[in-house]
Each structure stands twice: as C-alpha cells, then as structure tokens.
Image: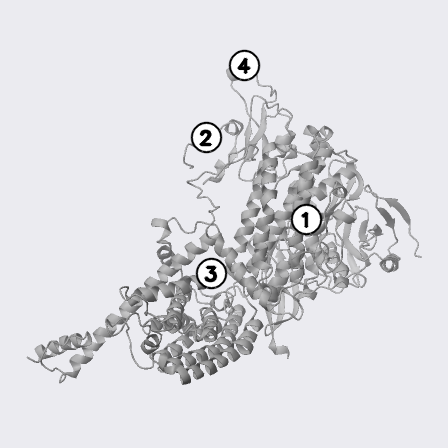
C-alpha cells in the first residue's frame, strides 16, 4: 500500500510539474514523491538542454567550416556524409581515440578539470534563455526572478577555466595565455555588466522573460544602441574569437592557454568556443532584439529567436573569419577608456528613459 | 604616391574594417577555385617535368646524364640484350650501358633532358610515382621506357 | 691614405683591392668614412696554402662598389665596430671557413651546431664523416659521431 | 627586477616563425627586453654542394635557397656565371628572364602578404593571395615545366622558349591582377585593427638599416631610394619605366605599403616587357647540350640583383676547371634578419610576429 502511494506520488509530482492537474486528490502529503519527481524532471531537462546545446554546437561548427571555406573560395569539408556533414563527428571520434597527454610537471587535477570549467557555463547558460512564450509553452528550463543576474554569474566562470588550464599546464605560452585571459576578462566584464544593468533598469526586472516582454513594442537595440555596441564587443571578447582572441592568439602564443591540451580535452575547449558563440548569439538576441517576440503571431516565438540568433552567429563568424587580432594593450585601452565610459553614458540615458517614458517599454 | 600613403585615422579606420569585412563577405558568392583531386584530374602542361622516360632506341650510352645528375639519381647500368633483339633493333648503344633512375630521389630538375645529345631522355607529365616498397623505386632502363600504368597496372604493390 | 698591396678588377668590372692583414681595419675605416655605408658580405676562401677574406662594400650614395681582399693565416680584425651587419657574416665565416675575427663580440657558430668538428668550406674537410646533433638538457647543442646520439 | 624576466623560446616549432627561426626572447611581462635569433635549422651548405659539381648543377641548389622566388635566385647565379665565362646571351632570353623574374617577385610578395596576414590573425586574405599566386605558378608550369623549383635559367639563355599559350596566360593574368590586388589591399590597408598593429611597430632607422646591410623593401621603407633595378640596372631594366616606392617611417606598415606598391610596379614592368620581347634565339647554343658539364670559368664575379627580399648575388670564383672553386651567396634575408634584435627591443610580444613577418625571411635563404 505504501509502495502504491509512493509511486502515485511520483506520478502526481511529474504531472504537476507539467502543469497537468487532473488528479483531484492532493498528494502533497508525500514530499518524497515530489522530490523524486523533481529529480526526474530535472534530469530529463538537463539531458535535453545538453543535447540541444550539443546539436547547436555541431551545427555551428559545420556552418563555420563551410562558410569559412565559402568566403575563402574553397569547398570545405565534403568527404564524410552528404556535403561533409559528418566531418565533426569523425573529428570527435579521432580526438577520443587520442592518447590523453598530461604534461609531466603540470598540476594534474587542475589541468584535467579546466576544460569542464570552461564548458559547463555553456550548458548552464542555455537553461536561462527563454525559447518561447512561457505563458503558452514552458520552453524555459529555469524561470525565476533573477535570470539575467544568474546568466552574468555563469558566464564569468569560463575565463576562470582558461586561467586554471593555462596556469596548471606548466608552459610559458600557456602562462601568457592565462594572464592575457585574466587581463582581458576584467577589461570587458565591467562595461558588459553596466550595460546589462541599464537593460534591467529599462525593463524593470531581472527576469529574462520580463525583459523580452518589455521589448514587445520596441527592441532595446534602438534606445540602447551604445549599450548594444558595448555588449556586442564584450560578447566577442567573451568567446575569444578575432579580433579579441588574445588568450589563444594562435600566431603569437602558439595556442595560448590550450597549448598543452590535446585529444578530447582540446576538443572540449573547441566545442566550448562554439557553444559560447551560440549562447552569446541567443543572449544578444534576447536582450537586445526582443527574443521570441515577433510581428506575426503565426510564426512561433522559437523561430523568431532562432532567426535573430542566426544573424548574430553569422556576424560573429564573419568577425572571426575576416578580422585580425588586436594587441593586448589596445584591447585593455578600449575596454577601460572607451567601453566603460560608453556603458556609463548608456546607463545614464536609459535611467532617464526609464524615468520619463518607462511605462511604454 | 597614392592615396594609401598615410595611415588612416579612427573614423576612416573603422570604415576600413567594415570595407574589409564586406570585401571578404562578397567573396562568398564567387566560384570556388579548389579542385577535388581524385575525382577531378589536374591538367599538366606539355612541358611538365614528371618522371624520366628513356627511349632505348636513341640512347648511345654517353653517360652525360650520369655526369650532370646533381644527386646521383641516374646511374649507368649494363643492360645486355639477347642476340636476336640486338640484331633486330640495331641499338646504337654499343657499350650496352643505359641510365637507371631512382624515382624516389629524382628532383625533376630536367638537366638530363637538357644535356642528352640524342633526346633519348625526356621528362614527361607522369607524376604517380608513389611506391610502398623502397626496392621498387629504382627503375631499370626498360622500365623507364614504359608508363606507370603499363608498369604497375592500377595498384602499387 | 693606407697603402694597398695590389689592385685589379673582377669580371663584372668592380675594383678589387688587396690590403695587408695589419692595415685592414684602418683601410676599411677610411672607406667607411669615404661613404661605403653597406658591408654586403664577408667571404672566406680556402686557397689550400692560405686563407683569404673578401669584403664587398657598397656605397648607396653614388652606387660605387669595392671588393677588399686580404690574405691571412686564420685571423683578421673584426669589422663589427664599423658595420653592425658584419656580426653575422663574420660568425658565418668563422663557422664555415674557420677564420677568426679579433674583437668580435660574440664569435660563435651560427649555422652549424656549437661543438661541430671542422669547418665545412675548407677544402680538406672530410665529407664522409657524419656528425650528429642533439640537445643537452640546458638547451645547448652538442655534436657526436655516434648516429644513436642525434639527428 | 631580474626574477621578473621570463625567457621564452619562440620557435623553431612555432606557428609564425616562417619556417625554422628560433628567437630566444627575454620578456618582462608582455614587453620584449632582449631578443637573440638562432638560425641554422635548415642549413644544407648549398655553397659547399655547389662547389662539388659542374656549373649548371649548382643551379639545383640555388633554386632551393629562396624557394618562393626561385627564378630570382637563379638569375643572380646565372648572371655571375655568364660574366665569369664571358658568355653572350641572346636578347630574347634576357627579356624572358626579366618578365619571369617580375612575375616571380609578385608571387613572392603574395606569399609574404598572405603569411603576414596570418601572423596578424587574419585567416582569409591568405587564401586570396595563394589563389592569385596559383595563377602565376600555372604560368611558370606552362613555361618551365615546374611549379616551384624551376631550373629554367641556363648559363647562356633559358632552357626552353616561351610559348604562345603562356603569353596569353600572362596577358590574362596581368590584365586583372591589378583589381584583385586592390581587393586584397582593401582588407588590410585601411583596416583600423591592422593599422594600429603595424604603425610605429618594428621601427628601423636608416642608419641602422645601412649599418646592418639591410636591403630591399626594408631599406626602401626606411627612407632610402635604393633599388638595383634603377640604380645599377642589369638585364634591360634601363629600358622600362617604373617607379621605386619609398616610405620614410621604417615601420611594419611602411613595409606593407612598399611591397604592395612594388607588386603594382612589377605588373607595369611585365606589361612593358611583354610588348618588347624580340624574336630570335633564346639559348646560346655554345653552352647547350654536352657543353653543360664542360663549362669553364676563371676569375671572380659578383653581379648583384634585386631579389624580392633585397640585394641578392652570387660571388663566384673560378679556377679554370669545370667546377666553381668557391660559391658565396649573398642572401638578403640573412642580412635583414641580423637586424631583428634592434627592431624588437622595447616592443610587445604581439609585435614580434608582426616584425618577423614584415622582414619576409625565407629560411632556405637564411640558412642556405
């Protein structure tokens, strides 16, 4: 009998989390069941988000390679699968087969966990993006009041992984990569957060949903154009792609913080890079282009979001393919002397906007 | 001299960034220039200096090619014909020495073709001289007269 | 005016000047002041019975060229105080021909590994003896005749 | 202070050392305190090898010095050897040489431009440069039979005549290369990121340049109007019109401008040469066929030529036998690279790659 109640409580919990409340009885008296149901739901969601993130990464890597080849008058991957679509899968298998090399003098534990520290925020970031209208279908994994704050907190973690990886691998180039990563991180993080704060002021909420809802009339890119520029440059720096790929800087520091990494550990860095590109495009689309909001209600919000994010992905890719690298002092100059004042100016403007015409947003 | 004489300032420079990105962006619509080599064959010009070919009917065994060869790829070897063959063909090579070539060390420098007084040695557009066994790389004079496909068929051993 | 031993012209018409070993530095200093601002190269030649050092000078002001030769038994004055570019050329001449340059700041081998036996551009250099190069722990090169010890 | 200095080995295995350059760099943070280039990893002793065989054999090794501009290398040797043997060279051969050398100069500068972009973190212009270079290599393939190492210039002429098809290819190339170059230049020239990275970086004053024997585009970028094609013409350079680009700044950006402009002038020269090639012999038959192994030279000769990297020449000494007694190669990259430490001191790590690539060192030539 107890077992029956126990199982039923789990079922009840599952249905409750899916917003299906047809069971007339209240099973709240069985908290264990609810708890287990919550665990199951969380596990499923985590796996789903992980899968979605990986699929996005795979698609993005393929698009990157093909598009880069396109711009360089080449054909690009074309051997494996139709139009070379399975190339990345083959690459992953190749990397998995490789010997796992840890340098003799490296700090082994730090060296081994560094790729995961870089990669985890990508997955964590994806749970915070509202992929559609919450009131219709809950496509947002974690919907709580301080989404944007948490998002910022999550994204700060990944440079830590780069620093740990660089410092632990006992290599001078990796050390320089780590130091540059640290310098770059504090260079763009402050203006980025200030520009996020101005969005929060304008929307009146930390919740990503509320921010999207606030953009139903006018995307924030128009009143917050300065903030957008700051945030966009910060996002490029965050992904460490050219022109701000200082921690890696292939032609100067061999491969920067990831010099000593090989095999799948390097593969994780590589995928984290693309994962961040996808995440950054979704974040920018959500914060500045109105997320899933779109003019025609026939088209679901998810499609709008993906279209908006794809535009940014192409821009990021173009920047990667077409631009050279800045020097580290030039980047820091830009961050502290131009981006920071710009973002503060933007904060002042958006405070004024919120004060006078705040209700309209 | 030209307008690119001075380095641009920030405004022109940011315009330059956008122009550069746009230039690269437009390249995406241009045709590809690479070729898929196993499927699409590359064209070789007539003069392409590929493998050494030897016309044994013309070779007089003067050893000039051995003398000029910069890295000892060409070595003269005696190659005796059976009596009847010799009778039939009237080889001009009385000493019966012919060049043999190690295709793995040949640098395709074309000097042997240039120096050959009778035009017996030529370098022709034949580049598939890849071998899996080192002993196969030294070509004897009759082998030098044949094409790769005649020598090895379609697969290399 | 520093005296020259003899003069001639090379095949392409450049003036060649033979200077004694003792007068070389003074002579070159005079030429430098005259306007020969580029030292193109330093060549060492092994004539079996003696060595010869050849300097090619160029004046970019009027395009004059001058070849200065000096006979030596293995040591001449360094030209680094006059032309900084002589540094590498003299190192190379020491490396390959084995002519020492007095007063050179850093007369080490440049193309071959430190510790190489013999000077390859000498006519009596044994070509059949192979030497193998490897790295020591501290990053310096060393040379050995044993093929198992290097590359 | 001392313990703050980190010593880093850039190379010989490093993505941006253009081969096998190794630079021992003392770094204080990002700033370069001292740099000490170590060379010799590609040493083959081409000079000794050239002394071991007949005169034409040496060309095989000369080809492999500056392997992106082989014909320029061959030219220096061939001119010196011809002076050594008092050879008469047919006029047509000289004009053909001139045209191919200019095309090869473009090819060499394109390789430089592409790899320079790569060192600055720009992936894409590299491919455009190599796309254009490929067309030049096709032309060379058509004329000489090889794509990279040609062995085409003979003592006393050229080994084979230029074909009508090749002339068509050259015309087609020269006609639209100008616009392609414009396109590639647009990616660099006004790009603020590129300009900021290269302006006032790797400065070399004129005095230092002369003292170190630096020649070629580097000397011209430092403000000296010195080009052997103009100042001491060889071949028929006195019969064609072209300008020498000069910049005063002596930094990486000035070198970039000089090289780009030089490519333009090379197009101009090649176009003029194309209209001036006379009919006639292309090879002095006195030097052909069995004579190749019996060429004798006496005395010494050094004919300087303007290779894409600077003053290049081969100092030949003949003792009357069929093999050269001494072959000394004046390689511009070697002299240019020796000035590297003074160009690096006080700059940052990121400027190291920019400066090294602006020298355009080719290690076949530096290490010989």
Relative to D345, is D122 above or below?
above
From the image, state whether disc 2 or disc 4 is nearer to you. Answer: 2
Residue tagged 3 = A318
Q: Secondary structure at mark 3?
A: helix
Q: Residues within 10 Å of mark 2 (few under 14, many from 20)?
A: few
- Label 2 to label 4, Cα distance in Å? 26 Å
Q: Quadrant of residue D205?
A: bottom right
Q: In terms of depth relative to the viewer, which is nearer, B18 or A357? A: A357
Mark 3 belongs to chain: A
Q: Are marks 2 and 4 on the same chain?
A: yes
Q: Which mark is residue D265?
A: 1
Residues A46 and A264: in front is A46
- Total marks placed: 4
Element at badge 4?
helix
Chain letter of mark 4 equals: B
Numbered circle sitting on residue B87: 4
Q: Nearer the viewer, residue D155 or A60?
A: A60
């Amino acid at each position: 009998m107890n077992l029956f109640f126990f199982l039923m409580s789990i079922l009840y919990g599952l249905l409750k989390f899916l917003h299906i409340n047809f069971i007339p009885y209240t099973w709240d008296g069985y908290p264990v069941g609810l708890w287990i149901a919550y665990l199951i739901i969380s596990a499923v969601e985590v796996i789903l988000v992980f899968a979605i993130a990986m699929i996005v990464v795979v698609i993005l890597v393929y698009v990157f390679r093909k598009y880069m080849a396109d711009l360089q008058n080449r054909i690009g991957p074309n051997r494996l699968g139709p139009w070379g679509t399975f190339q990345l899968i083959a690459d992953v298998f190749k990397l998995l087969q490789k010997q796992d090399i840890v340098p003799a003098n490296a700090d082994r534990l730090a060296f081994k966990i560094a790729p995961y520290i870089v990669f985890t925020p990508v997955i964590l970031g994806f749970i915070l993006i509202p992929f559609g209208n919450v009131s219709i279908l809950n496509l947002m994994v974690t919907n709580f009041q301080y989404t944007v704050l948490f998002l910022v907190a999550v994204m700060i973690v990944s440079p830590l992984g780069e620093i740990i990886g660089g410092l632990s691998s006992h290599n001078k180039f990796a050390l320089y990569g780590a130091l540059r990563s640290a310098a770059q991180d504090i260079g763009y993080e402050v203006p980025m957060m200030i520009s996020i704060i101005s969005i929060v002021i304008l929307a009146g909420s930390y919740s990503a949903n509320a921010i999207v809802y606030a953009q139903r009339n006018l995307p924030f890119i128009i009143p917050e154009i300065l903030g957008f520029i700051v945030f966009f440059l910060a996002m490029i720096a965050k992904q460490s792609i050219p022109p701000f790929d200082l921690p890696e800087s292939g032609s100067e520091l061999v491969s920067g913080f990831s010099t000593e990494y090989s095999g799948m550990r390097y593969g994780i860095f590589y995928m984290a890079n693309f994962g961040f590109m996808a995440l950054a495009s979704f974040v920018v689309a959500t914060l500045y282009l109105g997320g899933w909001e779109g003019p025609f209600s026939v088209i679901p919000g998810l499609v709008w979001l993906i279209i908006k994010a794809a535009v940014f992905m192409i821009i990021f890719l173009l920047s990667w393919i077409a631009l050279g690298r800045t020097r580290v002092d030039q980047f820091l100059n830009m961050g502290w002397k131009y981006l920071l004042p710009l973002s503060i100016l933007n904060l002042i403007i958006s405070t004024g906007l919120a004060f006078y015409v705040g209700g309209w947003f | 001299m030209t307008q690119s004489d001075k380095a641009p300032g920030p405004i022109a420079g940011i315009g330059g960034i956008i122009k550069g990105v746009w230039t690269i962006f437009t390249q995406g619509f241009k045709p590809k220039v690479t070729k898929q080599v196993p499927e699409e064959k590359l064209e070789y010009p007539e003069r392409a200096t590929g493998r050494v070919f030897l016309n044994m009917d013309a070779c007089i065994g003067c050893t000039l090619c051995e003398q000029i060869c910069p890295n000892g790829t060409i070595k003269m070897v005696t190659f005796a014909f059976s009596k009847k063959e010799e009778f039939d063909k009237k080889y001009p090579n009385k000493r019966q020495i012919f060049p043999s070539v190690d295709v793995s060390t040949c640098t395709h420098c074309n000097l042997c073709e240039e120096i050959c007084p009778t035009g017996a040695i030529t370098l022709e557009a034949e580049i598939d001289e890849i071998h899996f066994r080192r002993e196969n790389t030294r070509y004897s004079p009759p082998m030098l007269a044949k094409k790769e496909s005649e020598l090895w068929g379609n697969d290399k051993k | 005016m520093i005296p020259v031993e003899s003069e001639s012209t090379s095949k392409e018409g450049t003036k060649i000047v033979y200077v004694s070993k003792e007068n070389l530095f003074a002579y070159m200093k005079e030429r430098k002041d005259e306007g020969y601002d580029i030292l193109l190269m330093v060549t060492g030649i092994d004539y079996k019975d003696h060595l010869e050092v050849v300097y090619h000078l160029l004046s970019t002001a009027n395009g004059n060229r001058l070849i200065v030769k000096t006979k030596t038994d293995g040591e001449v004055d360094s030209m680094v105080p006059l032309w900084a570019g002589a540094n590498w050329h003299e190192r190379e001449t020491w490396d390959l021909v084995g002519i020492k340059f007095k007063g050179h700041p850093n007369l080490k081998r440049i193309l071959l590994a430190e510790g190489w036996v013999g000077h390859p551009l000498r006519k009596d250099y044994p070509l059949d003896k192979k030497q193998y190069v490897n790295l020591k722990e501290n990053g310096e090169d060393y040379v050995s005749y044993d093929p198992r010890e290097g590359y | 202070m001392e313990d703050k200095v980190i010593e880093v080995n850039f190379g010989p295995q490093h993505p941006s050392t253009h081969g096998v350059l190794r630079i021992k760099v003392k770094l204080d943070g990002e700033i370069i305190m001292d740099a000490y280039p170590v060379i010799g990893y590609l040493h083959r002793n081409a000079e000794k090898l050239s002394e071991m065989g007949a005169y034409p054999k040496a060309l095989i090794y000369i080809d492999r010095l500056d392997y992106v501009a082989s014909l320029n290398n061959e030219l220096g040797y061939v001119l010196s050897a011809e002076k050594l043997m008092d050879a008469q060279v047919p006029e047509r051969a000289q004009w053909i040489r001139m045209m191919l050398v200019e095309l090869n100069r473009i090819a060499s500068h394109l390789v430089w431009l592409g790899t320079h972009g790569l060192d600055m973190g720009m992936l894409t212009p590299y491919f455009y440069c190599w796309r254009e270079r490929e067309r030049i290599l096709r032309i060379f393939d058509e004329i000489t039979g090889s794509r990279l190492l040609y062995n085409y210039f003979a003592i006393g002429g050229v080994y084979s005549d230029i074909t009508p098809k090749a002339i068509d290819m050259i015309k087609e190339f020269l006609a639209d290369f100008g616009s392609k170059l414009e396109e590639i230049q647009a990616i660099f020239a006004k790009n603020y990121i590129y300009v900021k990275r290269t302006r006032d970086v790797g400065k070399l004053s004129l005095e230092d340049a002369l003292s170190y024997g630096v020649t070629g585009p580097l000397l011209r970028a430092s403000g000296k109007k010195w080009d052997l094609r103009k100042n001491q013409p060889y071949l028929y350079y006195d019969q064609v019109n072209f300008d020498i680009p000069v910049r005063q700044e002596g930094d990486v950006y000035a070198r970039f401008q000089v090289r780009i402009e030089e490519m333009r002038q090379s197009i101009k020269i090649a176009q003029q040469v194309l209209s001036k090639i006379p009919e006639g012999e292309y090879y002095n038959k006195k030097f052909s066929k069995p004579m190749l192994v019996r060429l004798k030279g006496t005395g010494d000769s050094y004919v300087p030529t303007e290779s894409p990297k600077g003053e290049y020449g081969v100092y030949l000494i003949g003792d009357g036998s069929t093999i050269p007694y001494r072959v000394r190669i004046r390689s511009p990259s070697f002299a240019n690279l020796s000035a590297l430490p003074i160009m690096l001191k006080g700059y940052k790590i990121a400027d190291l790659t920019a400066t090294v690539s602006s020298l355009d060192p080719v290690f076949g030539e530096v290490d010989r």
